[in-house]
Image (tube, grey):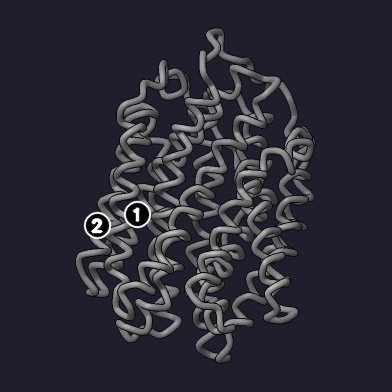
Amino acid sequence: MPVSAPQQPYAHPARLILILSLTPTVGLGIGRFAYSLVLPDMRDTLGWSYSAAGFMNTINAAGYLAGALIAAGIVKRFGLAAALRWGTLACVLSLALCALTGNFMVLSFARLLAGVGAAIGFVASGALAATIAQSWPARANFLLSLFYAGPGSGIVLSGLIAPFVLKAFGPGSWWIVWWAMTLLSAAMTLPLLLTSFGADGDIADATPVKFAVRPVLIYLAGYFLFGAGYIAYMTFMIAYVRDAGGGAAAQSAFWCLIGASAFVTPWVWRRVLAHDNGGSSTAIIIAANAVGAALPLSGHSAVLIVASALVFGVAFFAVVASTTVFVRFNYPPAAWPTAIAALTIAFGIGQTLGPVVTGAITDALGSLSYALDAGAAMLATGAAASAFQKKLAQT
């Protein structure tokens, strides 16, 4: 089905998309991934097993899955802008809850809330970003890459703050980190509340278009495996770096390298993302992600860990961009929120299962290397599955 560009191009698309990128910056870059930075201190202080630590990311992923399931309906009822704003505010509230208590149940609820808010915000902001990018077809893929660099900003900022707060205040100071993340996220939410995104009802008010699962089943399977595989790396690599002798500076540098890699994603993958050829772009990028995840398994040397962070980071953020590009190439604008939500559901199921499974593997076998092995294997399989996705028939 051919996609037509909106009749009225947005005057400042790059500025609007950069503001929209604050939604995944807060919901994903901080709301989800900053947990990995405080996980070692929380596990030591609160006496958690690796399974319990992994559960906190599992419950976050379960919330993300739940949010993805209801996102299209919320967008339809309230519009894109309202959905992304309320989703982001829910993430800020969840961060504040994490700072207030060490109670396992309350923390679990906070991580669940963060997942729900992040998914709703991501689906709404992703659909709006795709709409804005479509008004400038020649630069559409580049503009979408700017949006998906958003989580990298959150990772860099949290990486510059969390390890040094923990070092300054000592063991048991994980809750201070959560307060710092809360204040940072609240500040970044303000532009989302104050910016007008124009006719954001265009998609929400359009006639609904059915989303058929069968034609993209193999693609959904590949994205599911990506969700399951990447989360092992992002959950446990900071602990892996610490266990290898890396202090606050090493942990911060590693995390910031992953986040900073996002900023070169638009240039590194520009030609790959331009391929209107089914799942080939996604397959190539997930394969690179698998290589990055596998590098630490060869040893603990600084060179390998740095290379891993760079390769993983530059591919990680491009995978999600490639799925939105796939949606833009293969579906009409009215179907974008539903299609993005369907992909987010597949991703959400994968990342729900990933942390608790890899955490249990680590507890059973006694080494984080086994969790990273499993994650890299799932990424490689996801790349292979995505490669079989054909371009959808045009009507």
Please tell me which residue lies in front, 223 or 135.
135
Q: Where is residue 69 in the image (x, y as percent from the top left)?
A: 42, 46
Q: Can you name the residue that lies furthest to the top here?
A: 7
Q: In which quarter of the image is residue 121?
A: top left
Name the spot of residue 168 as percent of width and height, x first. 34, 72
Disc 1 and disc 2 in contact, CB within 8 angstroms: no
Question: Neighbour class for label 1 at 10 Å: few (<14), some, many (≥20)?
Answer: many
Question: Of marks 1 and 2, which one's residue comes earlier in the chain?
Answer: 2
Q: Position of residue 247 (x, y in %)?
A: 50, 77
Helix, strand or loop for disc 1:
helix
Image quadrant for the N terminus? top right
Q: Which mark is residue 218?
A: none
In the picture, measured across the screen, residue 103 lies left or right of residue 195, that is left
Please identify the residue farthest to the left as the structure is shown: 100
| Left or right, 246 with reference to 193 | right
Q: Name the residue under label 2.
A: 96
Question: Residue at image x 45%, y 46%?
Answer: 25
Q: Which residue is drawn at 37% across and 78% down?
A: 41
For label 2, the crowd category at 10 Å Cα-Cα, with few meaning under 14, some 14 to 19 and many 20 or more, is some
Q: Nearer the viewer, residue 180 or 316?
A: 180
Asked if residue 26 lies left or right of residue 180, the reply is right
Can residue 61 be seen from the camera position used here?
no
Reply above or below: 325 against 170. Answer: above
Q: In this view, does 233 lie above or below 116?
A: below
Please state which amino acid type lies under the numbered disc 2: Ala
Percent position of residue 383, x then y = 74, 56
Residue denoted by label 1:
114
Q: Which amino acid does label 1 sit on?
A: Ala
